[in-house]
């Protein structure tokens, strides 16, 4: 009588008995992985994980070019705080004009219709206020 073939795969250094289906699937997967590795070698693909050691993970050492730098975040926060302090130093009319133009996103023409003040005058005042804020920010 023919002896039934036994199938085994190596798991953590030990041979483990498995079904024929598991055995074939496992070795197909292993062959596919080797094929992909051979293809990468032929095309000169380099993985940063090849630089890994026990102490370092070189993939983590790569700069993140997408996320903002911590220095930029802090600078932006400090500038915003200073701008708010400078805005508080403006007169009520100046603050109202800046608030309408920049926070409510109204146009100068819309403000002209609301207030009856000519658009050119609004534009001149905005320019003057921005120069005033710039000087205050530079101090």
Image (cartoon, helix red, strand yellow):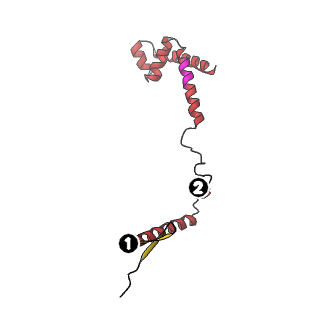
Q: Measuring 49% from the left and 15% from the top, which residue is drawn there? A: 95
Q: Does residue 83 belong to the magenta stretch? A: yes
Q: Position of residue 114 (x, y in %)?
A: 39, 15
- Label 1 with label 2: CB-CB less than 8 Å: no
The structure residue drawn at horizontal position 41% and vertical position 78%, both measured from the top left corner, is 6
Dominant secondary structure, magenta: helix
First in sequence: mark 1 vs mark 2: 1
Residue drawn where x is 63% and y is 21% of the image: 138
Q: Secondary structure at mark 2?
A: helix
Residue range highlighted in magenta: 80-86
* Furthest residue in direction left, as rendered: 1
Hey, which residue is sitting farthest right in the picture? 139
Q: Is residue 97 magenta?
A: no
Residue plotted at (46% across, 15% down): 96
Q: Is residue 20 above or below residue 137?
A: below
Front-lying residue, 139 or 59: 59
The residues tagged by marks 1 and 2 sit, at their Cα atoms, a distance apart of 35 Å
Q: Identify the image quadrant of the N terminus.
A: bottom left
Q: Quadrant of residue 132?
A: top right
Q: Is residue 119 above or below residue 34?
A: above
The numbered disc on residue 48 is 2
Residue lying farthest bottom? 1
Q: Which residue is mark 1?
A: 21
Q: Which mark is residue 108?
A: none
Residue 69 placement (x, y as % from top left): 58, 38
- The picture places residue 61, in percent across and down from the top left corner, at 61, 48
């Amino acid at each position: 009588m023919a002896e039934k073939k036994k199938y085994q795969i190596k798991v953590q250094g030990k041979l483990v008995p498995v079904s024929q289906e598991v055995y074939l699937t496992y070795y197909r997967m292993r062959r596919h992985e080797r094929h992909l590795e051979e293809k990468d070698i032929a095309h000169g693909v380099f993985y940063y994980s090849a630089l890994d050691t026990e102490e370092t993970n070189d993939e983590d050492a790569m700069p993140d070019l997408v996320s903002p730098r911590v220095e930029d975040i802090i600078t932006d926060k400090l500038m915003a705080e200073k701008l708010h302090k400078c805005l508080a130093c403006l007169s009520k009319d100046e603050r109202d004009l800046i608030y309408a133009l920049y926070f409510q996103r109204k146009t100068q023409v819309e403000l002209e219709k609301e207030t009856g003040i000519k658009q050119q005058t609004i534009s001149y005042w905005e320019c003057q206020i921005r120069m005033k804020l710039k000087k205050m920010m530079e101090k």
